[in-house]
Amino acid sequence: MEAAITTCFRHPSYETYVSCTRCERFICPDCMREAAVGHHCVECVKEGRRSVRQARTVFGGTVARSTVPLVTYALMGLNVLVYLVELVRPGIVDRFGMTGAGLAGPDGSQYVYVTDGFPGLQVIGVVDGEWYRLLTSAFLHLPPGDSALGSVPFGVLHIAFNMYALWNLGRVVEEQLGRVRYLALYLLSALGGSVLVYLIAPLDTAVGASGAVFGLAAAFYVVNRRLGRDMHAVNRFLAGFLVWMVISAGFTSWQGHLGGLLTGASVTVVYAYAPAERRTAVQAAGCVVLFAVLMLLVVLKTSALTG
């Protein structure tokens, strides 16, 4: 009596007598995958991978197979690209910088804002509904010709310092938070810096990624504290950032720095101490609530400026 001929379930023309030790379907050499005992078919291997729970950090970020900080690279690239555009079109600083309230003449000249405006001058800034300035300003930097340190071209140093800090801080924070949480932290910190500028110094114009960078500095502190690491070096690092905020107050926006710092700390505290069983929901809700609070502050300040 002849034995029944068996064929591969994926390749019926291939005769085989080897079966998957998991689903017991017959498989050919092309469909075999080594297993602890015997062989598995490709379908069972795929199903096994889907059922394996993906590793996450204590903040909920996915432990990526690649350690390349893609979001940090993208943010740095975007900042540098916008700066190159500034070299060609310096006017975008006035058009998209963080101006809370101002007046612009027909020739583009800007004047101090007054509540009821002024004949022949156009109201500009967040007070006139240009809310995009709250975020676009975080991707602009001082043009090369601007100098606040005598003969030093501070415009170039401005973006250089910010990108250096973003590179050093961003890699660490992105690895722990994951890409989505990290990007939300960065954007909220930038927004928080702009909002504080609007609340305290609405007549000033501010640009730069400093608010977001200070938010990352606060996140770096909270992350290390949550992980129980030695805080001596971290404390010295953050103290240096705070000293820089005081020193640079004479030629940069300390309001933007402080706003980014406070916002970044708030977001990361929510990330770090959200209950594990509903971590993602609590973290998302915390970001939404903080965003709503910032927007409410903008509305209230606009109401006060417009009378």
Image: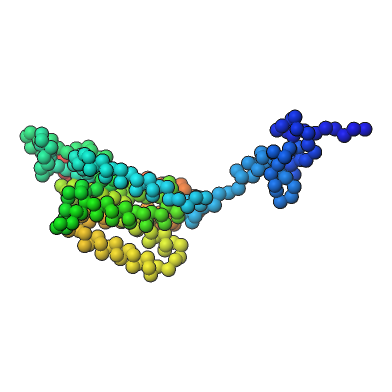
Q: Name the quadrant of the C terminus.
A: top left
The residue positioned 38% from the left and 54% from the top of the image is 170
Pick the front one: 153 or 243? 153
Can residue 83 be seen by looking at this rendering?
Answer: yes
The residue positioned 37% from the left and 57% from the top of the image is 168
- Residue 172, quarter of picture: bottom left
Q: Is residue 142 left or right of residue 235?
A: left
Where 243 sits versus 23, above or below? Answer: below
Q: Name the quadrant of the N terminus.
A: top right
- In the image, farthest residue toward the bottom: 232
Pick the front one: 274 or 146? 146
Picture mark count? 0
Where 259 sits versus 27, above or below? Answer: below
Give how far across and how far down residue 80 sits, in percent.
30, 46
Q: How is the image coloured?
A: rainbow
Give how far across and how far down residue 260 sits, in percent.
30, 53
Give how far across and how far down residue 91 sits, in percent.
19, 40
Q: Is residue 57 left or right of residue 7?
A: left
- In the image, farthest residue toward the right: 1
The residue positioned 60% from the left and 43% from the top of the image is 50
- In the image, farthest residue toward the top: 13
The residue positioned 38% from the left and 59% from the top of the image is 220
